[in-house]
Image: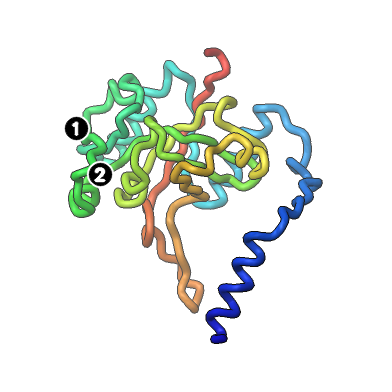
Amino acid sequence: MSTRDRVLGRIRRAVDGPDVPIPRDYLRSHGARNPAESADLLAAHLTGYRATVHRADEDGLAPLLARLLARRGSATVLVPPGLPPHWLAEADVALVPDLAVSTPAELDGVDSVVTGCALAVAETGTLVLDGGPEQGRRRITLIPDHHICVVRIPDRLVDSVPQALERLDPTRPLTWISGPSATSDIELDRVEGVHGPRTLEVVLLDASAQ
């Protein structure tokens, strides 16, 4: 019997063996917070990751997005199919739909992308996208250089990763984002925008009055 056969045999025996209960007695979150405190913690972590955080209510969202895109000089904005139309109603931009036929070069030529998010995790400063209607295909948030992500607070905010996993569908294409895309070489020189947007802006949308 070859080494390969022995390894595969062990894997088969492990897979076919009895299910072993996994203990779930870890902390579900580190401390008790009200929604405002959770939002503040999320904002602090995102800022620490070099994302830019803004806050708005429903009435102020469209003007804010228009200002952010104008400040960026964006003329074209990539939009997922379910993005609420009023979000960009005041922006002087050309809207580019999320199409399966779009090439990477075409997506790279778009100035900005605006999306919602599935969930945000306060304790880790993480945004989770799951390809839902307000988020679109994964690639539209990885190729353009500027991403604005709108997070509904408190509906789409949880304190911890365990709480997020309970609410997310593991069969969906989950993208976990903690700040702009960045990497460091062996000399610890930080380079941003290597495998995702160089600039990440997050809008915490107060949806508590809805």
What is the three-letter code of the residue carrying label 2? Asp
Left of 142 or right of it: where is 47? right
Q: Residues within 10 Å of mark 1 (few under 14, many from 20)?
A: few
Q: Residues within 10 Å of mark 2 (few under 14, many from 20)?
A: some
Residue that appears at 47% across and 45% down: 174
Q: Position of residue 20 (x, y in %)?
A: 75, 54
Q: Which residue is mark 2?
A: 111
Residue extending farthest right: 25
Q: Which residue is mark 1?
A: 94
Q: Position of residue 170 (x, y in %)?
A: 53, 43
Residue that appears at 53% across and 20% down: 207
Depicted 185 relative to depicted 63: above or below: below
Q: Is residue 185 visible?
A: yes
Q: Are marks 1 and 2 in contact (CB under 8 Å)?
A: no
Q: Quadrant of residue 149?
A: top left
Q: Position of residue 127 (x, y in %)?
A: 51, 42
Residue extending farthest top: 210
Left of 103 or right of it: where is 133? right
Residue that appears at 74% across and 41% down: 28
Depicted 17 relative to depicted 95: above or below: below
